[in-house]
Image: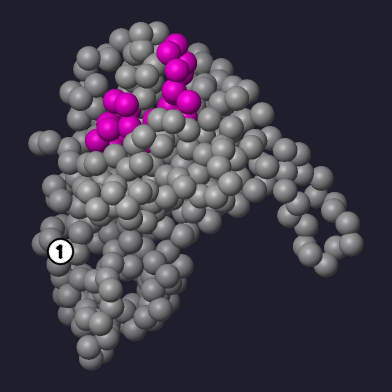
Amino acid sequence: MSYKHIPVMLNEVVHYLNCRPGKIYADCTLGGSGHASAILEKIVPDGILIGIDQDKDAIKNAKRILKPYELNIHLFHDNFVNLPKILSHLNIAAIDGILLDLGISLHHLESSGRGFSFRKDEPLDMRMNVESDTTAEELINTMDEESLAEIFYKYGEERRARKIARKIVMVRKKEKIKSSKHLAEIVCRAIPGKSSFNRRIHPATRVFMAVRIAVNRELDILNSFMETAVDLLKPEGRFCVLSFHSLEDRIVKKKIKLLEGKCICPPALPMCVCNKTRVVRSLSKKVLRPTEEEIAANPMARSAKLRAIEKL
């Protein structure tokens, strides 16, 4: 099985990571290995790339794609939150760069068979790591109405969360919801009249995103990783994060602000008491976005945001 994915903002990522020969970098979300290949081209012959992905398909693909660099890579089927343990296992104290690409790949949507897409009729799974416990089917069929609505609103920013949750609970009393197509149909039926077809995006888009985030605990893991990532860098080490929706970017932006030493005290306080210390500097004044040419060539890049920092 080929692993389909187009790396987003490839040139910008390689530039801001400052990839150089002999240095050590971690691609924490290998995906289709597009970013990893470009990084390796810059760091050979003596550089090291640590590649991590929680999807076994991505690791299998990486072994094939990155075979010419097999002496320069260490591949791990794991979650990026475990990077500190992985570095300890490799006896590496600190590294020169970290890449985190939070986007979902074309492979997951088109060929994984795990129900990530509302346009396909597949088992309702949505696990990035098929060895993890909770599936989307379990979540959809066991959570109470209030909890489902909270997930749809909190993670998907879906305004019709309660109506959709209510409809799901009604349907599952008669039959178990087992497929992505069935869930998408229920969401469409939950939104009355023509409103479901007057939106710029498919009415199930936000629900599917919310369920995927919940199943894979994506925001909790990102929050945890952002607390420790910079500690793993050498001085002048770089950290690049590609995010694809506002909830991810909000977490990244907030943490960077703290690391830059910007005051987080309530506005009502007459003076700063948080005593924040500057640990990093941002490498651009504003968040970086893909070019119009890249979006035209790869529509999945349209919502990408790149933030890049350097450890002081």
Identify the image quadrant of residue 234. top right
Residue 70: % across, % down = 27, 14
> Is residue 58 in sight in this rendering?
yes
Badge 1, how many Cα within 10 Å: few under 14, some, many 20+?
some
> Is residue 108 in sight in this rendering?
no
Q: Is residue 40 magenta?
A: no
Magenta range:
17-38
Residue 152: % across, % down = 38, 70
Farthest residue in the bottom direction? 193
Apparent side of residue 158 relative to residue 294 in the rendered image (left or right):
right
Apparent side of residue 33 relative to residue 311 in the rendered image (left or right):
left
Quadrant of the snapshot with the N terminus: top left
Q: Does residue 280 sit above or below 85 in this rendering? A: below
Residue 215: % across, % down = 35, 55
Apparent side of residue 136 relative to residue 144 in the rendered image (left or right):
left
Identify the image quadrant of residue 173. bottom left
Looking at this view, is 59 or 139 the one in front?
59
Residue 269: % across, % down = 85, 63
Q: Does residue 37 sit above or below 202 in this rendering? A: above
Q: Does residue 212 sit above or below 62 in this rendering? A: below
- Residue drawn at (29%, 25%), measured in percent from left and top? 37
- SS assignment at label 1: loop
Q: Does residue 141 sit above or below 49 in this rendering? A: below
Farthest residue in the front direction? 293
Query: Which residue does the numbered mark 1 point to in the structure image?
Result: 119
Identify the image quadrant of residue 129. top left
- Residue drawn at (66%, 41%), measured in percent from left and top? 259
Looking at this view, is 295 or 91 the one in front?
295
- Residue drawn at (56%, 26%), measured in percent from left and top? 237
